[in-house]
Amino acid sequence: MDFELSMEQEILRRTVRSFAEKEIAPVARELDEKEEFSLETCRSMGELGLFGMVVSEEYGGQGMDYVSYIIAVEELARVDGSHAATVAAGNSLGIGPLLYYGSEAQKRKYLPKLCTGRSLWGFGLTEPNAGSDAGGARTTAVLDGDEWVINGSKIFITNASAPNSLGVTVMARTGTREDGRGAELSCILVERGTRGFTAREMHGKMMWRSSNTSELYFDDCRVPRENLLGQRGKGFHQMLETLDAGRLSIGAMGLGGAQGAYELAMRYAKEREQFGRPISSFQINAFKLADMAMEIEAARLLLYKACWLKDRHQPFGKLAAMAKLYCSEVMGRVASQAVQLHGGYGLMKEYNVERFFRDQKLLTIGEGTSEIQRLVIARLIGAI
């Protein structure tokens, strides 16, 4: 086994870390406070090559491996969860379905634009009454001649109403399965500006306040028949495979966020003095920092192994679920202890650690809750 990253991956880590510290860190707190999506930093991330990282150069991407992509998300999350979310959703949920299931015409139409970061694409899955039970979606798409007529709504969709949003992939009921067991689900591409399609930005979030989150409404929204993504009736399968890969990027956000919170805690604990000595020197605090470091290292090894499997086209779903679950919960524990080490200052917005504390909560809910991850893992190990 070789645990050493390639020279290219190490250079990528240093490059993204430097960018995040110089370009994102100075504006992250203000953007969070204003709940403001930054078109400028999004484009800068695109210029750095952080969109379309695993897409081949033929379609305008970077042609990198999945480990490299995860390292980039990790380094962004080390500084700010909102920017990491924009990149993670842009690649895994926006670009991913188009790359893996799109026709050649669809790939050539959309991917080059999305790989620049100047345009974003959303993944319309969750509905007000269909979260963990994604198969219970009620949005419908009916063929009328050469057009799909879509009606319904989606909620909590990332990158779908940003100023540079180009469109969204919508999972909808397109009929009844041939075996009669439930609805036939398909994925359909809907461009921004299509009549009958409204994307409304959501505000008042506890976390990821400067990422774009949307409610989507479809009112007799008509799109061409050829906007079907892949085969009709394969939408649920496409969704599951998209989430498998998406879990890796959520894991990377947990890992990077934990690393960032840990570093803030270590720095503060070494500077803060009580009873005439740095608080890091007290055994109870030193042990907290030791536990943080240990869990972060374990999370990194688990996540990187899952990505290693994906890069080698081996089954990775079980480890992806484990990595998503473990990394997100590790960030929760690390961020909580980081706030504890800051004491009262950890509760103030002028200290970045409070933002990490808020941002971590989404990771145990988004792209499959911790409860659903445990269910997935239990099935994959044959327990149920």
Image (cartoon, grey):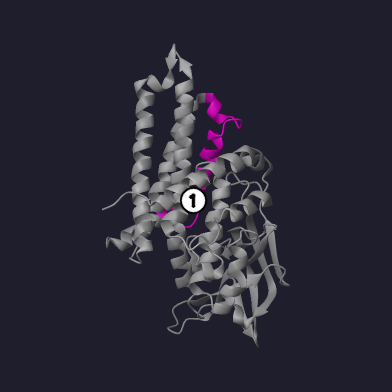
Residue 358 in magenta?
yes
Question: Mark 1 belongs to which amino acid?
Answer: Ala
Seen in the image, is 95 located left or right of residue 214? left
Work out whether 45 lies above or below 317. Answer: above
Seen in the image, is 287 located left or right of residue 65? left
x then y, percent, for residue 48: 57, 53
Residue 276 in magenta?
no
Work out whether 314 lies above or below 174. Answer: above
Dominant SS in magenta: helix
Residue, disc 1: 72
Which residues lie in the magenta part? Answer: 344-371
Q: How many marks?
A: 1
Q: Secondary structure at mark 1?
A: helix
x then y, percent, for residue 49: 55, 56
Give the farthest residue toward the bottom: 145
The image quadrant of residue 288 is: top left
Q: Which residue is more in the foreground, 300 or 211?
A: 300
x then y, percent, for residue 269: 45, 24
Mark 1 closeness class: few <14, some 14–19, many ≥20 residues within 10 Å? many
Query: Is residue 198 among what the camera can see?
Result: yes
Q: Which residue is more in the foreground, 28 or 336?
A: 28
Q: Quadrant of the C terminus?
A: bottom left
Q: Residue at x 42, y 38 (%)?
A: 333
x then y, percent, for residue 117: 61, 58
Q: Which residue is more in the foreground, 307 or 112?
A: 112
Query: Is residue 169 among what the camera can see?
Result: no
Give the farthest residue toward the top: 276
Seen in the image, is 76 located left or right of residue 147? left
Q: Residue at x 58, y 48 (%)?
A: 83
